[in-house]
Amino acid sequence: MLVSVVACSTASPATQTGVDAGGDTSVTYSYPKGFLFGSATAAFQVEKGLTASDWSAWARTKGKIVGDGHPDTGGPDALAHVDDDVKLLVDSKQNAYRFSIEWSRIYPTRESFDRNEPVAEAVAAYDGLITKLVAAKIAPMVTLHHFSMPSWLSDVTKSNEPQGWERPETSTLFAEFARRMAARWGKHVDLWITINEPLNVALGGYVQGSFPPGVLLDVPRALALVKAEARAHALAFDAIHEADTVDADGDGKAAMVSVALHQRTFHALDPNESVDVEAADRVRRLWNLWFANAIVRGDFDDEFDLSYDGPNDKKADPTLVKRADFLGFNYYSDTLVSATRGIILPVIKAAIYQANLETDRPKSDFGWDIHPDGLGVVLDELAPYGLPLIITENGLADASDNNRARFLAEHLVQVGQALQRGVDVRGYMHWALIDNFEWASGFCPKFGFASYNSSGTRTARPSLDVYRSIIESNSLAETRVAAMPAYKSATEFCR
Ligand code: IFM
């Protein structure tokens, strides 16, 4: 029998160890003061009425979305349910909420942007959300670009022409948008994310063709886009700092600005093939390190040779260096890489596999491997950049909620262990607060801590109560995790 779960402290404030009478050692993790325990969503995935977004046009194009789903007809309508969603956060003791302010809602036309005439109802809606969060002592983390682009900058019917980030004017317009949002809401918001998952925007839009503008297998165009996003991020970073000088949470700092990277682990499809092992490392350097190197160190690997020593590479480019106050990153799962099997993409000279992997790990409803250890790996990979780290998304599609509590707990164990190793982790945002529109996959994957019905009524899943108890006690014992029901691997997948 366990005598003391938290009998004595180790050197790390994050972890305490207890030894029971039988000599069993259990570890209980606790998290530093001020640690952000939150959830995340994104405007286009949870709001209705975004008619001036490229994603709206894309989702209305027959055949682009599984089940032809559209947030206007099946979504949770978050702006009409602010009180309900804030209640979910409050009831579960969360102290942070990541959401996005939709550029195309604030400025639906180029004219409204040029004249700086924001839509009053849109401003009022986000004002209402932010005010209620602040009143509930929930720190708002605002994303300014989460996949969706105003249709006046991105025409989904003209994929052969430059769209979105490809247009030379987009980066300066985005920086101006960021400046205005920071000026308006900086008194309440300290945490800003410029662009969500810059590499996924490029992969979805220019390689897989599943995101606007729907281009297939054009890796050079995708990589040019990533470079434009890095430049746009740096401009927006500067603009936010100029406009938001108010320290909203009293921690001595005003704006804290970053991106939300998407980090993964990478393994060889055939671990016995050295070409696969090399390819996995090549893809890892591109996917996990290129963007961070650009905006933290200012190392701009122009040709993506991934050696950071090519003919046009820059070191400490003054227009890019030190453009992150922390590193935000999303972590979900593993990728397998082959140098010989599948569609070999140029530049990376590899094929990548992200779903339905032939591994013995349990699978989520989305066919993604449940791989908590990978969170520890990517935390260690980012630690050398010397910045605080915030996990801006982590979660799984799990309609039955069988796996979510264990998934959550095992990832928080990884955070606890990283803290013990000295990694400066400041927060964890679960994806997602509520079920939502999962882009090309429509409404099948259920990522939410809560579901909703056709009238918008929210129902919390049992795993949210597990999150509440971890947050409330600020502790997570390995024995508790071990006692949770084992994963049930999904056998039918949303795609
Ligand atoms: O739903 C997405 C989110 O928009 C970006 N990160 C991954 C999530 C799950 O696929």
Image: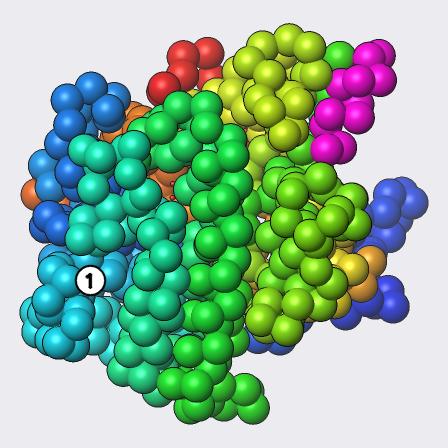
Residue 20 left/right relative to 291: right
Mark 1 is surrounded, within 10 Å at the Cα level, by few (under 14), some (14 to 19) or many (20 or more) other residues, namely some
Q: Is residue 487 left or right of residue 451?
A: right
Q: Nearer the viewer, residue 81 or 339?
A: 339
Segment colored magenta: 272-282
**Residue bearing the label numbered 1:** 82
Q: Nearer the viewer, residue 222 or 266?
A: 222
Name the outermost residue toward the front.
311
Q: Position of residue 29 (x, y in %)?
A: 70, 57
Vertical placement of residue 302 versus 493, above or below: below
Report the label total.
Answer: 1
Report the magenta stretch's main SS.
helix
Q: Position of residue 135 (x, y in %)?
A: 30, 80
The quarter of the image that holds ligand 1 is top left
Image quarter where the C terminus lies is top left
Q: Amino acid at mark 1?
A: Val
Instruction: Find out whether residue 276 is within the magenta segment.
Output: yes
Report if residue 325 lies within the magenta region.
Answer: no
